[in-house]
């Protein structure tokens, strides 16, 4: 019985740091509780696109930012491919001032500005 | 339709295994059955629930319902209280994080929920869902989890974010309960609660649950397969191992390791029963891979000559990666180190002949080999995936440790 009590104490001792780590992640690192939905950032884009058409994607950010992934996820099941070859291109940028210069550089025009950093562009 | 889907899943699962094991098997079968209907016949409706009900009825009729044995051993109040407090904390954190990020973590959005959105949004355009133009989205990954999510979205009539969250919660809760019940059945309730406590206290358990990753689902289904095989129910273990293979690519490797463990511990006749049990999900997996899935990016970019060239030079680096996990499994978790120390201390007095430790011992070198041959940058590959691979084995390892390292509990008077 004594060894079983030791087992319980040891299990608790080993489990506790893990749970404390979980608590620390949520309460000390995450900040205020706000729901963040990927779909909200790209709301309205899908309705402006022809059914089944592939969409391009362009950004001023690196791949680690996950911006491409977010567009792909929000517009699924539509296929979104990086680049500006498609007729329609979604731009999601870290610097909102880049939208116009990106459009200009690639011969695109802004169809809809979803937010300062997100726009739907179309080939001219 | 949601009630029908839930009833079909749980009734069929409970015909296979009691309690939490039944819930896990039922959810897995529900995802696989729905995926089979879509891939083979283009069906998305409630037919798969009807088929599950029929399957469950057939199993109940032939074998009778599986009821969980009533536990008799009394637990120390302090341990029970500690377990309940930790479970409440972990549950609260899960809810909090799910409110904050309902879409899940990176892999959930890049692979599992993305694929589910594809199946739900374009069930008649599967070539687009499994497009080879999106290699980073691993379109070749098996469909159990996306199929299960899409099935419940169809049942709900909307792409509700609550569905993948609830599925993740169901697998997590059922996994903890299954580990506790299965270990209790073999080594007494106190040991069972200790094992469940260690699982709850593994940071990756919560992280993988709230991120809605497939690794947690795979881990608890793998535990169920190991438990069923340990209890001598080889055909049922085979069926669940087949579901494991239909969840993630490495599940096939784990199912193979279970087959070898059964072959060694129980002989070729029981191994054949395991294979028979696994046939249906493996056939579905083969059909998916041959008909729909694009080539796997790792296999497509690997040749035997490359492997022979790079593998020997990586042994040290991969070994270091495994050692780092021993110290910091799942970020701050010290349970793996504690379990490893327990093996060293109790090695001379271990109970031999168990299937579960052999299974774990077979899978670990296979995981090691994956990193020796990977065409990716091995350091990045280790950093991004080793903790999740080890977690897939973690509940089974806890179960194996209880069986091999702790003597049977005395029978209650």
Image (tube, coloured by chain):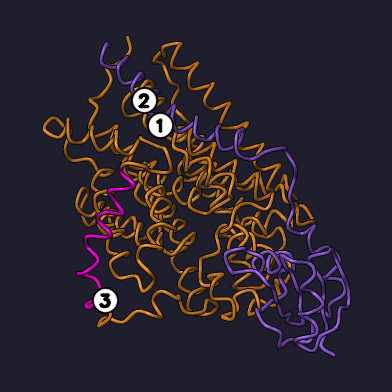
Chain colours: A purple, B orange
The region drawn magenta spans: B308-326
| Quadrant of image for the C terminus of chain B | top left
Instruction: Check disc 2 and report its element: helix, strand or loop.
Output: helix
Closer to viewer: mark 1 or mark 3: 3
Same chain for marks 1 and 3? Answer: yes
Give the letter of the chain under mark 1: B
Marks 1 and 3 close (CB-CB < 8 Å): no
Closer to the chain start, of discs 1 and 3, is 1
In the image, taking residue B309 as reference, residue B330 lies left or right, namely right
Q: CA distance from mark 1 to mark 2?
A: 6 Å
Toward the viewer: B193 or B260? B193
Instruction: Check disc 3 and report its element: helix, strand or loop.
Output: helix
Residue pointed to by mark 3: B307
Relative to B49, does residue A116 appear above or below in the rendering?
below
Relative to A38, does residue B192 appear above or below in the rendering?
above
Residue pointed to by mark 2: A11
> Residue at left 71%, top 58%?
B46
Q: CA distance from mark 1 to mark 3?
A: 37 Å
Relative to B212, does residue B249 appear above or below in the rendering?
below
The number of discs equals 3
Q: Dot 3 surroundings within 10 Å: few (below 14), some, or many (20 or more)?
A: some
Toward the viewer: B86 or B68? B86
Question: Toward which corner of the image does residue B196 lie, by quadrant?
Answer: top left
Give the letter of the chain under mark 2: A
Residue pointed to by mark 1: B198
Marks 1 and 2 close (CB-CB < 8 Å): yes
Instruction: Check disc 1 and report its element: helix, strand or loop.
Output: helix
Specify whether residue B312 is painted magenta.
yes
Q: Dot 1 surroundings within 10 Å: few (below 14), some, or many (20 or more)?
A: many
Question: Toward which corner of the image does residue A105 lie, by quadrant?
Answer: bottom right
Can residue B231 be seen here?
A: no
């Amino acid at each position: 019985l004594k060894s079983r009590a030791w087992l319980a104490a040891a299990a608790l001792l080993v489990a506790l740091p893990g749970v404390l780590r979980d608590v620390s992640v949520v309460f000390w690192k995450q900040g205020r509780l706000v729901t963040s939905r990927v779909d909200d950032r790209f709301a309205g884009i899908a309705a402006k696109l022809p059914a089944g058409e592939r969409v391009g994607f362009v950004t001023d950010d690196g791949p680690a930012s996950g911006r491409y992934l977010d567009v792909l996820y929000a517009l699924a099941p539509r296929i979104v491919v990086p680049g500006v070859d498609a007729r329609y291109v979604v731009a999601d940028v870290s610097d909102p001032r880049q939208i116009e210069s990106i459009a200009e550089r690639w011969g695109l025009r802004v169809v809809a500005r979803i937010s300062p950093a997100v726009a739907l562009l179309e080939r001219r | 339709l949601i009630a029908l889907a839930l009833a079909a899943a749980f009734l069929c699962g409970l015909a296979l295994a009691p309690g939490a094991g039944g819930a896990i098997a039922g959810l897995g079968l529900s995802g696989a059955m729905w995926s089979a209907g879509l891939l083979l016949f283009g069906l998305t409706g409630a037919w798969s629930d009807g088929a599950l009900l029929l399957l469950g009825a057939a199993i109940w009729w032939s074998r009778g319902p599986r009821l969980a044995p009533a536990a008799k051993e009394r637990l120390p109040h302090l341990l029970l209280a500690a377990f309940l407090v930790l479970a409440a904390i972990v549950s609260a954190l899960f809810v909090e994080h799910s409110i904050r990020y309902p879409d899940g973590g990176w892999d959930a959005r890049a692979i599992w929920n993305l694929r589910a959105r594809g199946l739900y949004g374009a069930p008649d355009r599967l070539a687009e869902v499994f497009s080879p133009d999106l290699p980073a989205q691993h379109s070749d990954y098996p469909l159990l989890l996306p199929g299960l999510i899409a099935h419940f979205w169809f049942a709900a009539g909307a792409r509700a974010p609550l569905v993948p969250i609830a599925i993740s919660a169901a697998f997590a809760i059922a996994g903890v309960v299954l580990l506790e019940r299965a270990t209790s059945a073999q080594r007494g309730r106190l040991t069972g609660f200790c094992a469940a406590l260690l699982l709850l206290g593994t940071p990756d358990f919560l992280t993988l649950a709230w991120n809605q990753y497939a690794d947690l689902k795979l881990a608890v289904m793998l535990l169920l397969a190991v438990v069923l095989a340990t209890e001598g129910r080889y055909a049922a273990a085979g069926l669940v191992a087949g579901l494991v293979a239909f969840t993630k690519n490495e599940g096939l490797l784990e199912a193979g390791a279970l087959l070898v463990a059964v072959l060694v511990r129980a002989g070729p006749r029981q191994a054949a029963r395991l294979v028979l049990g696994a046939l249906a999900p493996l056939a579905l997996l083969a059909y998916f891979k041959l008909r729909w899935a694009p080539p796997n990016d790792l296999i497509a970019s690997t040749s035997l000559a490359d492997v022979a060239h790079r593998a020997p030079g990586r042994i040290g680096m991969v070994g270091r990666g495994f050692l780092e996990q021993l110290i910091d499994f799942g970020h701050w978790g010290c349970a793996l180190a504690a379990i490893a120390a327990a093996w060293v201390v109790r090695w001379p007095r271990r109970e031999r002949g168990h299937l579960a430790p052999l299974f774990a011992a077979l899978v670990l070198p296979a995981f090691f080999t994956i990193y020796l041959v990977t065409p990716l940058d091995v350091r990045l590959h280790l950093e991004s995936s080793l903790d999740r691979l080890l977690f897939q084995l973690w509940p089974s390892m806890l179960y194996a440790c209880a069986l091999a390292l702790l003597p049977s509990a005395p029978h209650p008077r």
